[in-house]
Image: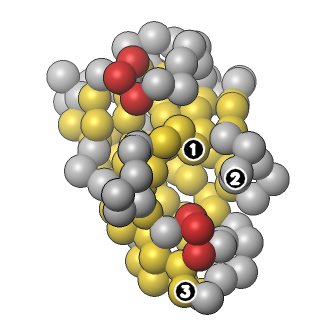
């Protein structure tokens, strides 16, 4: 069992930056590919970024490519999402998730086994 806790959300102006963290407990994150997802009001949860177990592979949704960077520090059992050049359309609750598979195999939220509680990101125009 893995427990995930996100932090780092907040209110930022358009063009600003935020860094989200996802801290894990219960088990080492070395055994999991990790993903970040987001959900805006009235919309379905959508894929943002994912990273393989050792950080050797990363994938991004087209909407955030070039602006967001996912990374991980397995020694600290933590995954990060650096978000730059934020836009109002990035406003959502951001969730981290763990997939019991070492490599990135899916962007489908249903394929991920463990979830955090989410952190709110609000970008004002």
SS type, badge 2: loop
What residue is shown with label 2? 64
**In terms of sequence position, does the residue under pointer 2 or pointer 1 come before the other?**
1
What residue is shown with label 3? 124
Image coordinates of residue 12 in percent, x first then y, are 54, 84
Image coordinates of residue 18 in percent, x first then y, are 56, 71
- Mark number for residue 48? 1
Q: Is residue 8 visible?
A: no
**In terms of sequence position, does the residue under pointer 2 or pointer 3 come before the other?**
2
- Mark number for residue 25? none
Badge 2 vs badge 1, beta-carbon distance below 8 Å: yes
SS type, badge 3: strand
**In terms of sequence position, does the residue under pointer 1 or pointer 3 come before the other?**
1
Looking at the image, which residue is at 62% across and 59% down? 82
Alpha carbons under labels 2 and 1: distance apart: 7 Å
Image coordinates of residue 4 in percent, x first then y, are 28, 42
Alpha carbons under labels 1 and 3: distance apart: 20 Å
Bin the neighbour count of mark 3 within 10 Å (Cα to Cα): few under 14, some 14-19, many 20 and up: some
């Amino acid at each position: 069992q893995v427990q995930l806790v996100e932090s780092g959300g907040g209110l930022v102006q358009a063009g600003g930056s935020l860094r989200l963290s996802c801290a894990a407990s219960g088990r080492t994150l070395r055994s999991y590919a990790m993903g970040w997802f987001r959900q805006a009001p009235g919309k379905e949860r959508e894929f943002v970024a994912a990273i393989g177990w050792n950080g050797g592979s990363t994938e991004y949704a087209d909407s955030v490519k070039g602006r967001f960077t996912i990374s991980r520090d397995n020694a600290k059992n933590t995954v990060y999402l650096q978000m730059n050049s934020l836009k109002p359309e990035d406003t959502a609750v951001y969730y981290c998730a763990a997939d019991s598979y070492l490599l990135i195999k899916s962007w489908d939220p249903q394929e991920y086994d463990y979830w955090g509680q989410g952190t709110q990101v609000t970008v004002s125009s």
